[in-house]
Amino acid sequence: MRYSEMKALEQRRAARRGHAPLSPGAAGNRMPWWMFLVIGLVLLLLAACSSPVYRDTTVTMQTNGPVNIDRYQGLWYEIARFPNRFEEGCVGVTAEYSRNPDGTIKVVNTCREGTLDGPVDVVEGIATAALPEADRLEVSFVPWLPFAKGDYWILFTDYEVAVVGTPSGSVGWVLARTPTLPPERLEAAYDVLRRNGYDLSRITLTLQPPA
């Protein structure tokens, strides 16, 4: 699901809360609440069914081990990714993590559409971890659908570089605290993905501004 699709779902939710018509001239013709659930479920199922797989799922995925979530907070630049629908056309991608008062983790993903000076697209989500130190998180960008969560497994991090994947192999990222990485550090990150069964011929570098 692309950023814009997620935002559209949130807008529908807001319209329902405010009892506003969903389209011009549709006053009094409000969509039943359960239709929002159906629409969200259908979109998620379609996205899941159409997602390619980038790793050999017979390979056991090895994670980093305990990750200090407080140290992991802050801004990360996306260095490389496997293609996915929700980041299609995105450059200059960043992810920022911060603690919510209830202990969950606020996730703010930002992309520039097409070019580094293109329109900014932002989507917010919530991540949860079973423990204060954890390498396996669940992330949701549609919090009103409790079952709409995705795996976010930290395969490696030294808190300057992070390699993230999912057992399904439908996504994978290399992140860093800086917009670019030296070749040897990028290759080390790629090695983590290889060991976890990923096909590196399908990864793409994300355009970022110069460091």
Image (cartoon, rainbow, N blue to C red):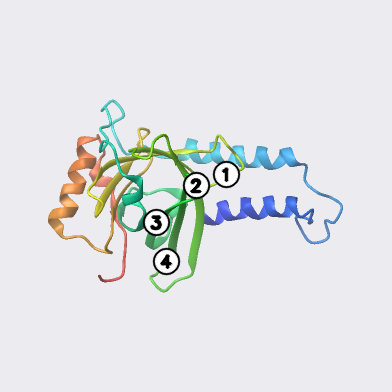
Disc 2 to disc 3, how far (Cα)?
Answer: 12 Å
Q: Position of residue 40 (x, y in %)?
A: 61, 42
Residue 184 image label: none
Query: Quick one: SS at disc 3?
Result: strand
As displayed, is residue 57 above or below residue 158? Answer: above
Q: Position of residue 31 (x, y in %)?
A: 77, 46
Q: Which residue is mark 2?
A: 126
| Amino acid on which the number 1 mark rests in the picture | Pro
Screen quadrant of the C terminus: bottom left
* Dot 3 or dot 4, earlier in sequence: 3
Q: Is residue 2 visible?
A: no
- Residue lying at the far right in this picture: please name it: 28
Gap in angstroms between the C-alphas marked 2 and 1: 7 Å
State the residue in front, 53 or 100: 100
Do labels 4 and 2 touch, CB within 8 Å? Answer: no
Q: Which mark is residue 143?
A: 1
Can you tell which mark lies on residue 114?
4
- Mark 1: give few (<14), some (14-19) or many (20+) Cα within 10 Å: some
Image check: 139 left or right of 153?
Answer: right
Badge 2: residue crowd in 10 Å (few <14, some 14–19, many ≥20): many
Residue type indicated by callout 2: Ile
- Which badge, 1 or 4, is on the more N-terminal residue? 4
Residue occupying the point 28% across, 59% down? 177
User: Are the residues flagged by discs 2 and 1 in contact, CB closer than 8 Å?
Assistant: yes
**Residue named by callout 3:** 95
Q: Would you call the spot at circle 4 few (<14 residues within 10 Å), some (14-19), or many (20 or more)? A: some
Q: Hey, which quadrant is residue 80 in on the image? A: bottom left
- Tell me if I can see residue 85 in this picture: yes
| Most foreground residue, 110 or 66 | 66
Q: Is the residue 30 above or below the residue 179 in the image?
A: above
What residue lies at 38% left-to-right and 40% top-to-bottom?
Answer: 132
**What's the residue type where badge 3 is placed?**
Ala
